[in-house]
Amino acid sequence: MEYLKLLGIGIVVAGMALRLNAGLVVSIAGVATGLLAGMSLVGSGAEAGILDSIGKSFVDARVMLIFLLMLPMIGLMEDDGLRERARYLISKLASATAGRLLWIYQLIREIGGTMGIRLGGHEMMVRPLIYPMALGTAQDPGTEEENLKAACSAADNYGNFFGQNVFIGSPGVLLIYQVTANLGYNTDLFYLAVWSVPVAVLAAVLGFFQFTLMDRKIRRKNP
Amino acid sequence: MSFLSGLEPIFIVTGLVLVAYSFFSLRDRPLKNGIPQACFWFLLGTVMAAGPYIPHWLCGLIVLVLVALDGARLLGTGSYGEKSDKVRIQRAGQLRERVFIPVLLVPLVVVAALIAARVLKINTSTTALVWLGYGTMAACLAAMIISRSRPARLLQQGRRISEIIGAVLLLPPLLASLGLLFREAGVGDIVARFLSMVVPQNSLFAGCAVYCLGMAVFTFIMGNGFAAFAVITAGIGVPFVLQGRDIDPNMITALALTAGYCGTLMTPMAANFNIVPVALLEMKNRTGVIRFQVPFALVLLGFHIMLMWLLAGGI
């Protein structure tokens, strides 16, 4: 009978896997978990209800929405050519090999992430700029094309994922802060960001190895 | 003074910005989806600015209404008076590197404030967050000065990105609520009892391994590292790693989230990152991006387990 409480986890997993609306899935899982635990919808007296619990935790979690205040500034600068400028600066990077170019792109994306900006993106950077630049270094574009496309996308993902948590205002860091607080553990934005540095560095080192290996493979094919 | 050094003023400013969005949305497209979009910003802004003064159950109801507005597909994007590509490229040439100043200002203010707080020996438990808020406000001002714009344009461009992101921005706080409900219902204890049949609860290494692998596997299944974090930290992280041990939760949980991102690199469920590029670049192999990323992800996941164990005092 107690295992019924796990239904909430099941709902989240199934709903997300089926690509249903994420907000709806999470809300339904929350309400179901509360009902199975015997909570009422609206509490009475000292007893908290499900709506009280959702409302209180949302108000406590407003910290996670502070990043919304950053969007006007980013939007304004984007409309004044922030991305175009970044794209121009990257396009001036001359690089002899595709692997080296992609590693540098990963680094730039990671460093941008540590300051809270999305400098890349598959639509914004990879297709119009990074992929053509990588292809420009190829000696035999016909055979390398498919592999280079995968590598360009991967460089963007690596840089995107593992740099962003070094920024203390990133949604990931704010999520950890609030979830751990709800679970009774005190975390600190600054230290969460600091402890995200080792993985950011490791990801950069691993990227260096993978892209260097890729260069070597290409060279062996076209001696 | 104590009011200004807390987070409430920042919440109020953010809330007012969101309420302002609602007026722009209403004016922008009153007949299309402007009315539900305006309701969304108005309600969210109200909870943001005045949450503590509204009864909890009413806030809960508002949150569910916000989710329902999105679930019923009533939200969308409008027009924001943005510049044409040609004008924007021209502007980029005029502003040059100055266009990056406001963005760099945010971390600069935070780090400077933290150093100042350390030197003046001020308690820093929430200072970083507060300065993040004020740093952001300073950056918004700097952006207006550099681009010589009025506040209306600042708000319009903020609304542009916010409406592109859409109701997904509600997800992190919703997941935090879910974590809380899980805790109140005792979900963590049940998962822990279930898992402890296979995993020795007193082994630190096993705990770190299960926490990292659990993050990766759940992210793989759901395609969303944030959702996995809320579920797995309550179910595995606390009972198997943190509970009863004197470990810094900052390093453990920071590592857990990026362990989840290793799962993101390997799953077709994270379509934005792994499947959309396949289409964008017109690749032949649908799983080409994932295949390239798997070795990287597995090695990095292994490092996560080792690192978590080492930092938690495994030796």
Image: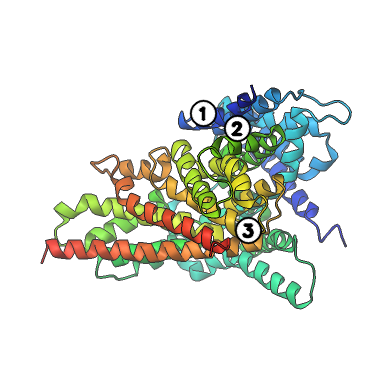
Residue under mark 2: which chain is it in? A
Q: Residue at x 76, y 23 (%)?
A: A41
In this orientation, which residue lies closer to the viewer: B177 or B145?
B177
Q: Which mark is residue A89?
A: none
Residue under mark 1: which chain is it in? A
Residue A183 occupies which quadrant of the picture?
Answer: top right
| Numbered label tally | 3
Mark 1 and mark 3 on one chain: no
Name the residue type under label 1. Gly
Residue B36 occupies which quadrant of the picture?
Answer: top right
Q: Residue at x 51, y 28 (%)?
A: A15
Where residue B108 sits in the image (x, y, percent)?
63, 70
Helix, strand or loop for disc 1 = helix
Label 3, on which residue? B250
Q: Which mark is residue A15?
A: 1
Label 2, on which residue? A26
How many angstroms separate mark 2 from mark 1 (CA)?
A: 8 Å
Asked whether the beta carbons under mark 2 and mark 1 sit within 8 Å of each other, the answer is yes
Name the residue type under label 2. Val
Asked whether the beta carbons under mark 2 and mark 3 sit within 8 Å of each other, the answer is no
Q: Is residue A7 above or below residue B215?
A: above
How many angstroms separate mark 2 from mark 3 (CA)?
A: 25 Å
At label 3, counting other C-alpha atoms closer than 10 Å, the crowd grade (few under 14, some 14-19, many 20 or more) is many
- Look at discs 2 and 3 and give the one toward the viewer: 3
Where residue A75 sits in the image (x, y, percent)?
56, 53
Mark 2 and mark 3 on one chain: no
At label 2, counting other C-alpha atoms closer than 10 Å, the crowd grade (few under 14, some 14-19, many 20 or more) is many
How many angstroms separate mark 1 from mark 3 (CA)?
A: 30 Å
